[in-house]
Image (cartoon, rainbow, N blue to C red):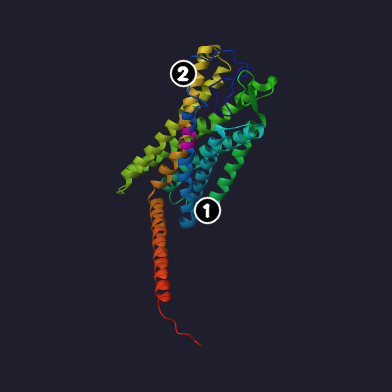
Amino acid sequence: MNISEYESFPYLDYDYNDTCDQDGGPELPNGTTILHMLYYMLFFLSVLGNTTIFWVLIRYIKLKSMTDVCLLNLALSDLILAASLPLLVNYQNLATCKLLTGVYQVGFYSGNLFVTLMSVDRYLAIVHAVAAMRARTLRYGIIASITIWIISVIMAIPGLRFAALEIDPDDNSSVCQPFYPHESQHLWKMLRNFSENTVGLFVGLPVMIFCYVKILVVLSKSRNSKKDRAIKLIFTIVCVFVICWVPYNVVVLLKTLQLFLETLKTCQAEKAINSAMSYAEIIALSHCCVNPIIYAFVGEKFRKSLRNALTRYFCWRQLSRGTLSHRDTTEKETSNTPVKSDY
């Protein structure tokens, strides 16, 4: 079995009987220092941004609404997705391979679903502000979040079940990839591709567009002085989602069509699609670093809470240092003062 050098993620082995010579096609330097550094950079940026969201939400905002719950779970989903990046650099055995597959796919599905849920939440908050007050409570936010996590885990089970570590005997290199039963591999590939496209392309994107178009219509009629800023934020959210996830979903769709169209089964087409997938993956993974910026740090409520949190923290540090300094000075003065003996 030839292992394609383009495959860097656990869900990407779309053709187990690949006989094409992959040399000479455009590619990302998979396994090189540059790519590994990129994985680690995305990991650290995601951890920094999303842990900050966790800290502020739990300690200062206190999860008072459905929006807070959605934002917290989106941050958790991004952290799970980012956790797969160090594993991509080094997976030595089947257990690590399965862990990589499960972590990535749970993060992938939950991230897309929570972005969609936040779009619906914003739509309800602005378009149906009065009628949706009862539906946007903390309780319903928790119920919706638990439902999304259950769906994400269920959708990730097939990938986890069929994950395998394939070793190339020529250079003793290994790749983590799904290995489906031969008699039903086309069916499993279609189900996997369709589930990914459903979450990110067929459902997530149309729902986002519908919600934000309706929001823009309402804001355009509003006399609120901050509506221009809100419109820019909405435009940014949609554009970032499209830039990050649409290329990946389009390539996955091409992989599905490749199962049926002979014109996409040629070596040239396969090399082009594999190369496109390599670039699309990196772009898609960067979304877990951008989410904290567009969903939290840009929001006025979160920025105010973060500013207050940092102010309290640094004031506490300065106060602690001042107290310690005063204590040291007092001790020195006391040590230099003659002490009258009781004897």
x and y percentages locating residue 308 in the rendered image: 39, 57
Among all residues in the image, which is located at the extreme front?
Answer: 343
Q: Identify which residue is drawn at 37% across, 43% down.
A: 218
Which residue lies under the disc numbered 2? 26
x and y percentages locating residue 5 in the rendered image: 55, 21
Residue 242's tag is: none
Mark 1 or 2, which is nearer the eye? 2
> Between residues 284 and 209, which one lies in front from this camera angle?
284
Q: Identify which residue is drawn at 32% across, 48% down.
A: 226
Figure disc tally: 2
Identified by mark 2, the residue type is Pro
Q: Quadrant of residue 220?
A: top left
Which residue lies under the disc numbered 1? 138
Q: CA distance from mark 1 to mark 2?
A: 49 Å
Residue 192 drawn in magenta: no
Callout 1: SS: helix
Q: Is residue 339 above or below residue 126?
A: below
Q: Identify which residue is drawn at 46% across, 53% down.
A: 56
Q: Identify which residue is drawn at 44% across, 34% down.
A: 241
Main SS, magenta region, reads helix
> Between residues 315 and 157, which one lies in front from this camera angle?
315
Callout 2: SS: loop
Residue 38 drawn in magenta: yes
**Quadrant in the picture for the N terminus:** top right
Q: Is residue 226 above or below residue 152?
A: below
x and y percentages locating residue 144 in the rendered image: 56, 46
Q: Tell whether label 2 touches label 1 (CB within 8 Å).
A: no
Whether residue 249 is visible here, answered yes or no, is yes
> What are the residue bounds of the magenta stretch?
37-41
Q: Is residue 338 left or right of residue 229?
A: right
Q: Is residue 52 above or below residue 154?
A: below
